[in-house]
Amino acid sequence: MTSFDSTPPLNMGRLLLALAVVFVMLATTGWTAVHHQRESTALRASLTAWEEGRVDGRALPDPSAAPGRLSRFFATLTPAQRTTLAHRYPLAVGNMNGAPAELRYLANRIALREQVRVERARMHDARLSPAGQHEAGRRMQRYESMSDRDRKILAFDPDGAGRAAEVFGDLDSAQRISVVVPGVDTALLTFQRTYRKYSAPVGMAQALYAAEREASPKTRTAVIAWADYTSPAGLGIDSATAMRAESGATRLNALVRALPGVSPVSLFCHSYGSVVCGVAAHTLPERVSDIAVAGSPGMRVESAVQLRTSARVWAMRDADDWVQDVPYLELGGLGHGADPMSSGFGARVLSAREAKGHAGYFEPGTDSLRNFAGIGAGVYDSVRCAAEDDACREDLSGATTAGRA
């Protein structure tokens, strides 16, 4: 049975009571939100067209083929042929693991501009309610912003609440790559924010990219704001189970395996994103050197060893983060297992001094962001442990071994 660090174990009666309270709370908050998302088939239509298409008399490869197979296919094409495919099948190419990053940016820019026209028409569609027309206007504005030529959109899917990923830096030349994996309520309309900027994936990634360059100016880094999975909508049943995490883990593994080069990859997993990273850990390639979680409700295991990863596992939590009050257990599929901050879990515990509660780990000027940047840039001697000792930095000079935290 899981217990909180430095507290006596919960007896079975208290555990079941806590579980029942959480179940009732989650069942009455946000439970229906996921069932009211706008639906679209734009990506499916683009993939179907791709499957029926040809280039230079040749059939196009299976869009779900291994990234290496797709990469080799694109390498056989001329620049003009690649550009033609991006214009003809923008959503398919823009979301295709194995397609060159620059081609995906182009394809997604084309797809976004097409969706701007779709949403502009929906704004004046009399069949929609005023609320529906208003949402169309919000989506149109978001798509216009994302389609700017300076942005590097690595993935874009307008279906449902929407998914996206954006790159900061140069993936092809990066010596180290970081991936920000966000938690609940992540969708196209929450992909970036003006108010509370650093609580949204784009702001998180921008802050981390800037901090990594400050931590190690000579290291070429790239950061991905990865909101390319369907996250739970609010504190509903989905957020208390691994269903969304399992599908997200599959997509995260596909992303990492399609990244160019062989540079080390670090994952920065916030809130429910840490559940995704926990489920994905044993499937990820060895180039994933670090998995850092912040404000984690658990990683679906009882210890870091059970993640079955060669990556270093790091954990942090702000003293004012409400997530520390959730029951760290898993019973009947509900809950996410042990507390990654507990001594028994075995993670390297980092300082989160000056973080701003559950959503403030990427705020500039915080220990949490500086620690993330040190890990992402590979400057491990700069990280600050939660305790006064240097336990979280022990044995950092040697090679990682399977299951080591």
Image: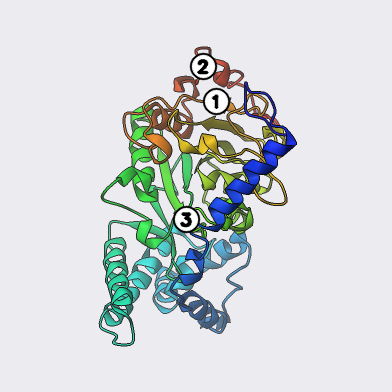
Provide the residue designation for mark 1.
Answer: 349
Mark 1 crowd level (few <14, some 14–19, many ≥20, 10 Å Cα): many
Display colour scheme: rainbow
Question: Which mark identifies residue 387?
Answer: 2
How far apart are labels 2 and 1 at the CA level?
8 Å
Most extreme residue toward the top is 389
Residue type of the residue flagged with mark 3: Gly
User: Helix, strand, or loop for circle 2?
Assistant: loop
Mark yes or no: residue 300 visible.
Answer: no
Badge 2 vs badge 1, beta-carbon distance below 8 Å: yes
Residue 367 is situated, as x and y percent measured from the top left of the image, at: 39, 26
User: Helix, strand, or loop for circle 1?
Assistant: strand
Residue 48 is situated, as x and y percent measured from the top left of the image, at: 54, 81
Residue 192 is situated, as x and y percent measured from the top left of the image, at: 33, 53
How far apart are labels 2 and 3 at the CA level?
33 Å
Q: Nearer the viewer, mark 3 or mark 1?
A: 3
Most extreme residue toward the bottom is 126
Q: Nearer the viewer, mark 2 or mark 3?
A: 3
